[in-house]
Amino acid sequence: MDKITVPVLRGMKGKQKITMLTAYDHPTAKILDNAGVDTLLVGDSVGPVVLGYPNTIPVTVDEMIHHTRAVARGTRKALLIIDMPFMSYQESIEQAKRNAGRMFKESGAEAVKLEGGVNMHDTIKAIVDIDIPVVAHIGLTPQSIHRMGGYKVQGKGKDVEKLLDDARAVEAAGAFMVVLECVPRQLAKEITEMLSIPTIGIGAGPDCDGQVLVIHDLLGLLGDFRPKFVKQYLNLSEEIDRAVKEYINEVTAGNFPDDSQSFH
């Protein structure tokens, strides 16, 4: 099993689709890594998905490091990426370098991801210049949902040129890959063909160089919540519900544990 590295991912553009999934804990990371996923992202989506926050904004650097350490212990092949949470890089370039360095050093991640395009060009360049690989994230950027007015498709009408400028800016700054979130399919295709770095789509159509999903969405662990761009491959919440109810019934009926689960 060959290790996935930054040069390997860059070399996959135009030749082989890249797979990315989120992971937030050790057992999930082991399963996904053994299954052959190319990249694992410890996203700040850990906030709403795992920690019960209303969105990604409250997530801290310490929380990101904590979860990424657990994922790193279960990852052997996949490239591991850590999200830089809100206000860990926006204050100044020095702050961004300091936090990127700490997260990179302490978490076991092999790249950091941050949101923004033209406005983050200098920040991305500064982090890349200290030898920390950067994944950019443009389009719908969840840390900016209040400015955007919610989770809405980006890159329509007058915003098309802005998104194209953002894509050019992050590539010029040295990002080795860029996530396109909630972008019209044709625009995502245009950006993918325009850039020399891989694009990873989430709600950006099939023409990107790769795709990412939140693992809880893929497995059906978030109940009825299902964005348009999600394909649910399993309804694990129903399976867990069935198993737990069976356990409750067996315990209350006195059928568990039975002799085979007892010591003699």
Image (spheres, grey):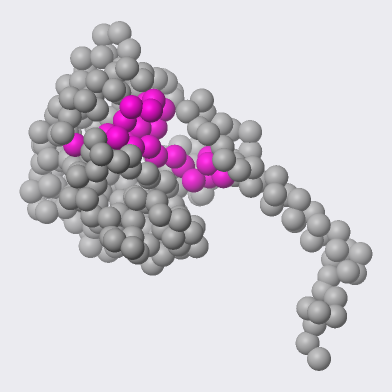
Q: Residue furthest left?
A: 129
Q: Residue furthest front?
A: 15
On screen, 81 above or below 227?
Answer: below
170 part of magenta stretch? no
Measured as percent of width and height from the top left, residue 251 is found at 84, 66
Write down the quadrant of residue 152 in the picture: top left
Residue at x 41%, y 65% (from the top left corner): 74
Q: Residue furthest bottom?
A: 264
Q: Nearer the viewer, residue 233 or 53?
A: 233
Q: How many marks?
A: 0
Write down the quadrant of residue 189 in the picture: top left
On screen, 11 above or below 98?
Answer: above
Write down the quadrant of residue 196 in the picture: top left
Could one spot residue 62 in this view of the protein? Answer: no
Residue at x 37%, y 44% (from the top left corner): 19
Tell me if 170 is positioned left or right of 75 in this view. left
Magenta-colored span: 197-219
Placement of the N terminus among the 4 image quadrants: bottom left
Measured as percent of width and height from the top left, residue 70 is found at 41, 63
Q: Residue furthest top?
A: 157
Measured as percent of width and height from the top left, residue 89 is found at 22, 43
Residue at x 56%, y 31% (from the top left corner): 226
Q: Nearer the viewer, residue 244 or 197?
A: 197
206 part of magenta stretch? yes
Measured as percent of width and height from the top left, residue 104 is found at 24, 58
